[in-house]
Amino acid sequence: MLFKKLLTIAVAAITLTFVSSCSRTVTRVDPTEQIDISGNWNNTDSRQVAEEMTTTILNAHWLTDHLSEKAGKKPVVIVGFVQNKSHEHIEAETFVKDVERAFVQTEKVRLVQGGKKREELRGEKADQQTNSSISTMKKFGLENGADYILQGSINSIVDALNKKKVVYYQVNLELTNIETNEVVWVGEKKIAKYIKN
Amino acid sequence: MKHLFYIAILLILPAMANCQQIAFAVDQNPHYKESQDKYLKIADSLTKSHSTTIQQTYKAYDWYEAKLERKRQDREWLHQERMNRKYITNYYPDYNPYNNYYSNPWRREYHRFWW
């Protein structure tokens, strides 16, 4: 009798372990919640960079200087490339888009499209030259020329020994006057992580 | 009189055509034609991806998934090895003249004088 009971409990325990090890649970979490799993670059790092960059770029002197120089005319910015020189795959678009969004939402800075999206726009405009009605056709040569270009770089330093590791990230964004090549703003965010296995 | 009229037309028409060519919109770039001609040639290739999602994904490293993949790969290799075992032949036979059944000193019957 006792043996039978023990056997039942053992079978139940094994089944439970097997089922729990095979099942996968997914829970929605707040994107602002800090969850560090592997120690690699994650959404918290991206958010911290975005917060730092958006607050500093919109409150820096370059903006007031431009407005006073150009009689209140808002600056036009184009986003250039961000160079990832770190040891990890880091998608800079996640925080650059936040900066772009801040430009558009605050209406302090005008943003123009660049890169492949601009090519697509010009392709559409060219298509309209032969297919759209005259009243709706958009003309070439009327784009807004950018005053400044936003470029950036991501660097990292890794120091590891045995099961300990320190990873340091430095993200820089630079705003340069296209006409004069003068760098008018440099944003910086440093992140250091201590990982112990 | 008729000749004069034709001459006048010949002079005016190219002038009108020239005027049409340089009728820019306000603030329009005077070199816009260069860009327009360039993009007219490639407009089809640039607009064919409209309303589509360009998949530019990358494979993120997942420790658990990588472990499962390694296990799966190991199982497959083992299976392949088992399947191919019957086809495996010894391409390099042993040329040692002493390595045969009767010259092997470890053979149980080697040191026996008679049987």
Image: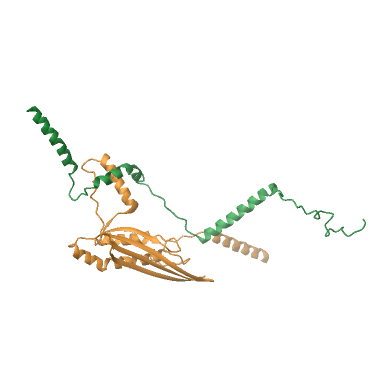
For chain A, the rendered hue is: orange
Between B53 and A181, which is closer to the camera in this rendering? A181
- Quarter of the picture containing the N terminus of chain A is bottom right
Q: Residue at x 15, y 35 (%)?
A: B13
Image quarter for residue B43? top left
Between A154 and A197, which is closer to the camera in this rendering? A154
Is A183 on the left or on the right of A161, as rendered?
Answer: left
Q: Position of residue A135 (x, y in %)?
A: 20, 42
Q: Which residue is farthest top?
A: B2
Between A173 and A105, which is closer to the camera in this rendering? A173
Between A124 and B95, which is closer to the camera in this rendering? B95
Above or below: residue B77 compared with residue A189? above
Q: Residue at x 19, y 42 (%)?
A: B21
Query: Is residue B47 shown to the viewer in this render?
Result: yes
Q: Position of residue B7 (x, y in %)?
A: 11, 32
The colour scheme applied to this rendered structure is by chain
Q: Which residue is farthest right?
A: B114
Q: Residue at x 34, y 64 (%)?
A: A173
Image quarter for residue A20? bottom right
Query: Is residue A22 shown to the viewer in this render?
Result: no
Q: Position of residue A21 (x, y in %)?
A: 55, 61
Q: Which residue is farthest left?
A: B1
Q: Position of residue A165 (x, y in %)?
A: 49, 71
Is B93 on the left or on the right of A30, as rendered?
Answer: right
Chain with colour green in the figure: B
